[in-house]
Image (tube, helix red, strand yellow):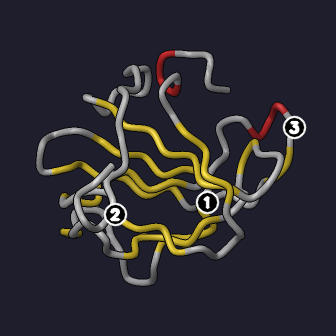
């Protein structure tokens, strides 16, 4: 599923269901999708993943996909800081195994191409 512009630069992080998902940057909760329980490799599950999208202070959008659920009490518009727990990983949607799919965009349009990004460690290193 990483062959089209919206998720060409996405990465998948293998992790057990229930792993804490941390905000990658300071920003605001832009969108929460949490209405799916579908899991597996059926084509009908392609667009049924639960997700959280943050709008960063720099104006980019980070989407965290295949989450089990957001943290309790988290709502659209809430302010988050880098490192805050925002969700718990899962295997919801079109997925062969538990993992977290992460992609970054310059726009919130559904066809916006993903952009390359790097993770930085707690000490500021990549």
- Residue under label 3, please give it: 42
CB under 8 Å between discs 1 and 3: no
- Whether 116 is drawn above or below 87: the answer is above
- Whether 23 is drawn above or below 126: the answer is below
Q: Position of residue 24 (x, y in %)?
A: 32, 57
- Distance between the Cα atoms at labels 2 and 1? 21 Å
- Distance between the Cα atoms at labels 3 and 2? 29 Å
| Dot placed on the residue nearer the N-terminal end, 3 or 2 | 2
The label on residue 23 is 2
Considering the image in quadrants, where does the N terminus appear?
A: top right
- Whether 20 is drawn above or below 90: the answer is below
Secondary element type, mark 3 = loop
Q: Position of residue 30 (x, y in %)?
A: 29, 52
The one of 85 and 117 positioned closer to us in this rendering:
117
- Whether 18 is drawn above or below 40: the answer is below
Q: In the rendered view, does 35 fall on the left or right side of 37?
A: left
Secondary element type, mark 1 = loop
Residue shown at 39%/75% (left/top)? Answer: 85
The label on residue 35 is 1
- Distance between the Cα atoms at labels 1 and 3? 17 Å
Crowd tier of the residue under label 3, counting other residues whose Cα lies within 10 Å: few below 14, some 14–19, many 20 or above: few
Crowd tier of the residue under label 2, counting other residues whose Cα lies within 10 Å: few below 14, some 14–19, many 20 or above: many
Q: Position of residue 88 (x, y in %)?
A: 56, 72
């Amino acid at each position: 599923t990483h062959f089209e512009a919206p998720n060409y630069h996405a990465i998948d992080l293998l992790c057990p269901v229930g792993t804490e998902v941390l905000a990658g940057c300071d920003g605001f909760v832009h969108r929460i999708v949490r209405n799916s329980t579908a899991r597996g490799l059926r084509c009908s599950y392609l667009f049924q993943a639960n997700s959280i999208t943050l709008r960063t202070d720099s104006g980019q959008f980070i989407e965290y996909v295949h989450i089990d659920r957001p943290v309790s009490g988290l709502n659209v518009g809430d302010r988050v800081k880098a490192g805050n727990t925002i969700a718990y990983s899962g295997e919801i949607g079109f997925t062969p195994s538990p993992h977290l799919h992460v992609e970054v965009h310059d726009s919130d349009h559904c066809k916006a191409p993903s952009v390359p990004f790097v993770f930085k460690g707690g000490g500021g290193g990549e």
